[in-house]
Amino acid sequence: MTDFTKLKLTIDGAVARIWLDQPDTRNAFDDIVIAELTQAFVEAGDAAQVKAIVLGANGPAFCAGANLNWMRRMADYTRDENLADAGKLADMLRTIAECPKPTIARVQGDVYAGGMGLVAACDMAVSVDTAWYCLSEVKIGLIPATISPYVIRAMGARASQRYFLTAERFTAAEAHRIGFVHEVVAADGIDAKVDELLKALTDASPAAVRACKTLLADVTGREIDAALIAKTVDGIADIRASDEGREGVQAFLQKRKPSWLS
């Protein structure tokens, strides 16, 4: 396992936990954090025993976006240097979003700017009720471009039209109302709620969960035409004929636990 400098990766049985670990900078990210997050999700996603991954943070904030020192360096970048830099951020977000294992964002504090992309790239999100959210980019003359595919997918185009353009802060309750987070709980209940989701994820067929992630990517936003229907027919035929598909159905019919829970 890689020895990370700005985050922590732990694997305990079927669960991997990735912790942003720079509370003094409100877990703001820079080029090193971006590289380490990318590597951590690759390692956790490739670990055979891992069935689910939690992305959390230490300190009062979940992620305040870009680190100020990194922003000072970027201010002098050429356009080509900015392209390369933004490309690494885009690669990190895509790595999280396309991770073969299901991912949960454990949001214990405020989420700003690029931090919104981290939450949106995860499959599901649990937030404390005291967290504030903000897409603050336009306040400093920027746009949330790299994170936009994931944020718009998470909160919808209509809510994005408001919060991209106004840079208003909004509450965890509002984040839940617009679908950006799935659950809002008191701070002392966040781990219990995350554990509920982990139990559901780790009880499920690992192959079926991976196939569901692919299914979502293939179907979301697509026109319902003959090609899409054919793809879904292929998908159910493939999973029914798979080892875990056969085992799961047999276990259900025989009223026993499937092999992946034995």
Image: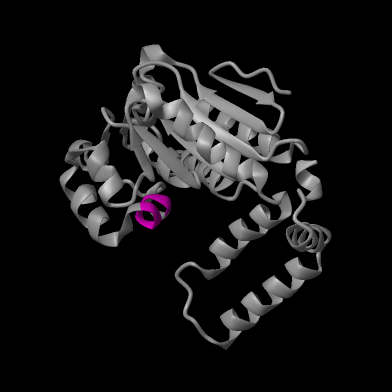
The quarter of the rendered structure image containing the N terminus is top right
Query: Which one is in front, 29 or 134?
Result: 134
Q: Residue at x 56, y 31 (%)?
A: 37
Quadrant assignment, res 73: top left
Q: Quadrant of the C terminus?
A: top right
* Relative to 72, residue 116 above or below: below
Q: Between residues 96 and 136, which one lies in front from this camera angle?
A: 96
**Position in image of residue 31 (x %, y %):** 50, 28
Colour scheme in use: one colour
Q: Could you tell me residue 107's position as x and y percent? A: 40, 31
**Would you say residue 153 sits in the magenta stretch?**
yes
Seen from the viewer's position, the closer of residues 137 and 11 is 11
Taking the spot 63% from the left edge, 30% from the top edge, the residue there is 16
Above or below, 196 relative to 152: above
Residue at 34 percent of width and 27 percent of height? 64
Q: Residue 32 appears at what percent x and percent y?
A: 53, 25
Q: Is residue 105 magenta?
A: no
Compared across the picture, whether 248 is left or right of 81 comes to right
- Residues rendered magenta in the picture: 150-154
The quadrant in which residue 24 appears is top left
Left or right of residue 58, residue 226 in this image: right
> In terms of secondary structure, what is the magenta stretch mainly?
helix
Residue at far top of view: 24
Residue at (31, 33) in percent of width and height: 112
Q: How many marks?
A: 0
